[in-house]
């Protein structure tokens, strides 16, 4: 059996030159505006390539329903004219075969393409994967209000002096739309839009200066990798990843960019370099490492992994909880990482509500006493400060907190539920919601840490996934750190590649804490990759497991808690409401 001829797409195949593209400019006349309740009465289309007309298609269609009088007046198509015309089940297959392989063009394309698609589905035909171009939308991006007060076809026909005047008949309107298309493409050619890919992504928000930088994408790898935008002094401005680096970088210069900061970055960038990667996981991990190393000013996330916060159960005669930034090899128990001090404080409060650990920050000794605090009087602290509690008496409390942080967190959840029920019975709903949110912050972090700790405990894990072109994407992970990656070619036996990768992979020594050799973000990437349905475990040194009664089994409660929080405070997360850059409106 011969191997299939797989190949990596080139930039030209992703966006062929416009001169080589076949366009089918189509226009429909219908009995109304909805494809669900109205029918097509006429189809007209013009096939053009390289600026020349290479074919035309026109036919009336029997709608098998009466044409409304105002439609008949508007189009001039009457019931008598379509009485002997073929029905749509005859016309549409012929049109789709005639237009196959071309790019559909229409003025207000959602209307015409929507009618064609709805009728195809009604006939039980699969809708072909047509690319489409909307001349009305394109005109809004190209023309100013001084040139065209609106983007009606009749207005654009006057602007571009079309050879045919639109008259609400399908073929005449299609011919006029074809002339408008050529006029718009001529304008776009002056703006550096020369390929179909650039036409699809064109927007007036991209400046001419940005388009002139398209050459920065030349020579970059076409497969997966990491790209780095640099300024005139070679300093990294922005680091990103992509499965097709060259195509992605090119998009920065030809497509709209709603993120104002990134649009600014593109204007400053002078060079772009890239690192080719074996597969997507390696690209994602390399991106995180490079961002953490260089801290580019236009990257927002992952720049400061060293600033992550941890909840620490200290090693003292009377242990307590503390929020720290650094992990130490001191035998302490750590929970994290937390992205903010607020979340860390919420998780700490959740533990204190379940286990009455002391909350004072001074170091206590059984040989010295000090006055008790108000928490002792409230029964929320055993008051080891006054000497009435020995370290052995206090040890069960520390052990209970340790179990919550590393093992079974259900006692914390049970305590939270009881307290919430009591508060709800007193109609103190806001306090109950606060308890729920604090418990959720703890449980979510505990579940994540248990997943990370399980991976970090493995001296070596080798896994594979089906990759591009039928080969295998293979990764070697040591103590939670990606130590090697390779992609096997189609048809090759994977075992020699696995053995070679294991022999040449990075040597990783375990460090301190739940993430001893890699950042939590890197380990999250690896875990997501391993969780895909097509992932296969090849070799494992050690054990990879999480607690059977761990926080990972409480996802349903966490989901319900998140739903309750979002319903009560729908506007807390405003990421979806950020303003985006819009061009200033021109005065008319």
Image (tube, rainbow, N blue to C red):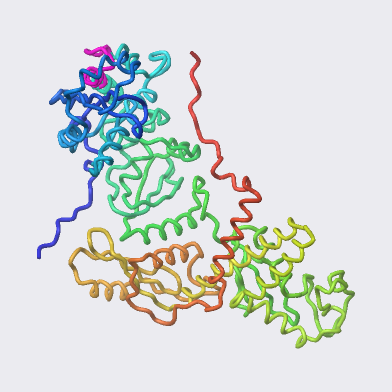
Q: Residue at x 77, y 62 (%)?
A: 425
Q: How many numbered dots are placed on residues in this image? A: 0
Where in the figure is residue 347, as x and y percent of width and height? Answer: 66, 65
Can see residue 50? Answer: no
Q: Is residue 173 magenta?
A: yes
- Does residue 552 appear left or right of residue 285 in this picture? right
Where in the figure is residue 318, as x and y percent of width and height? Answer: 75, 80
Residue 193, compared with residue 324, is above or below; it is: above
Q: Which residues are magenta?
A: 161-177
Can see residue 391? Answer: yes
Q: Is residue 402 magenta?
A: no
- Does residue 568 appear left or right of residue 512 in this picture? right
Where in the figure is residue 210, as x and y percent of width and height? Answer: 38, 33
Q: Nearer the viewer, residue 157 or 284?
A: 157
Q: Residue at x 69, y 76 (%)?
A: 314
Q: Residue at x 22, y 52 (%)?
A: 8
Q: Residue at x 22, y 41 (%)?
A: 12
| Quarter of image, res 423 | bottom right
- Does residue 44 appear left or right of residue 555 in this picture? left
User: Outermost residue, bottom direction?
Assistant: 392
Q: Nearer the viewer, residue 378 or 317?
A: 378
| Quarter of image, res 503 | bottom left
Image quarter where the N terminus lies is: bottom left
Residue 247, compared with residue 467, is above or below; it is: above
Where in the figure is residue 220, as x and y percent of width and height? Answer: 30, 47
Residue 523, compared with residue 303, is above or below; it is: below
Residue 184, compared with residue 500, is above or below; it is: above
User: Outermost residue, right direction?
Assistant: 371
């Amino acid at each position: 059996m011969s191997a299939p001829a797989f190949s990596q797409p080139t930039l030209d195949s992703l966006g062929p030159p416009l001169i080589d593209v076949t366009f089918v400019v189509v226009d429909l006349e219908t009995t109304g505006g909805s494809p669900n309740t109205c029918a097509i009465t006429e189809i007209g289309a013009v096939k053009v390539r390289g600026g020349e007309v290479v074919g035309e298609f026109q036919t009336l269609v029997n709608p098998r329903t009466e044409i409304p009088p105002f439609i008949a007046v508007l189009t001039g198509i009457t019931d008598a004219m379509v009485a002997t015309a073929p029905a749509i089940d005859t016309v549409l297959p012929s049109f789709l075969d005639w237009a196959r392989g071309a790019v559909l063009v229409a003025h207000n394309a959602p209307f015409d393409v929507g009618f064609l698609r709805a009728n195809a589905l009604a006939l039980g035909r699969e809708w072909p994967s047509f690319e489409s171009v909307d001349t009305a939308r394109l005109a809004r991006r190209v023309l100013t209000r001084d040139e065209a007060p609106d983007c009606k076809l009749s207005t654009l026909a006057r602007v571009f002096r079309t050879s045919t005047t639109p008259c609400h008949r399908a073929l005449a309107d299609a011919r006029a739309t074809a002339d408008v298309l050529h006029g718009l493409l001529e304008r776009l050619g002056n703006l550096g839009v020369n390929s179909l890919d650039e036409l699809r992504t064109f927007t007036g928000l991209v400046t001419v200066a940005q388009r002139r930088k398209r050459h920065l994408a030349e020579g970059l790898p076409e497969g997966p990798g990491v790209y780095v935008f640099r300024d005139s002094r070679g300093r990294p401005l922005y680091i990103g990843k992509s499965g097709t680096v060259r195509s992605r970088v090119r998009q920065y210069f030809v497509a709209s960019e709603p993120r104002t900061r990134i649009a600014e970055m593109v204007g400053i960038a002078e060079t772009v370099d890239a690192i080719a990667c074996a597969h997507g996981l390696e690209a994602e991990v390399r991106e995180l490492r490079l961002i953490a190393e260089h801290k580019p000013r236009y990257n927002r996330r992952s720049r400061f992994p060293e600033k992550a916060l941890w909840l620490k159960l200290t090693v003292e005669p009377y242990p307590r909880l503390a929020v720290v930034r650094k992990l130490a090899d001191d035998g302490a128990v750590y929970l994290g990482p937390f992205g903010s001090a607020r979340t860390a404080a919420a998780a700490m409060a959740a533990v204190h509500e379940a286990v009455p650990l002391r909350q004072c920050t001074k170091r206590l000794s059984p040989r010295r006493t000090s006055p008790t605090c108000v928490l002792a009087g409230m029964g929320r602290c055993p008051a080891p400060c006054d000497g009435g509690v020995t370290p052995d008496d206090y040890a069960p409390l520390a052990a209970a907190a340790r179990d919550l942080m590393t093992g079974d967190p259900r006692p914390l959840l049970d305590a939270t539920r009881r307290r919430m029920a009591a508060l709800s019975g007193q109609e103190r709903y806001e306090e109950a919601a606060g308890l729920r949110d604090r418990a959720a912050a703890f449980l979510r972090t505990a579940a994540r840490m248990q997943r990370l700790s399980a991976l970090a405990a493995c001296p070596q894990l080798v896994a594979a996934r089906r990759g591009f072109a039928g080969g295998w994407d293979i990764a070697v992970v040591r103590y939670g750190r990606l130590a090697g990656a390779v992609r096997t070619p189609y048809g090759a036996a994977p075992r020699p590649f696995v053995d070679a990768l294991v022999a040449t992979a990075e040597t990783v020594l375990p460090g301190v804490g739940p993430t001893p050799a890699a950042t939590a973000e890197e380990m999250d990437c690896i875990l997501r990759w391993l969780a895909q349905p097509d992932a296969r475990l090849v070799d494992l040194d050690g054990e990879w497991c999480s607690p059977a009664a761990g926080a990972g089994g409480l996802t349903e409660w966490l989901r319900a808690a998140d739903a309750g929080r979002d319903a009560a405070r729908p506007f807390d997360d405003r990421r979806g409401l950020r303003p985006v850059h819009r061009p200033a409106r021109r005065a008319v």
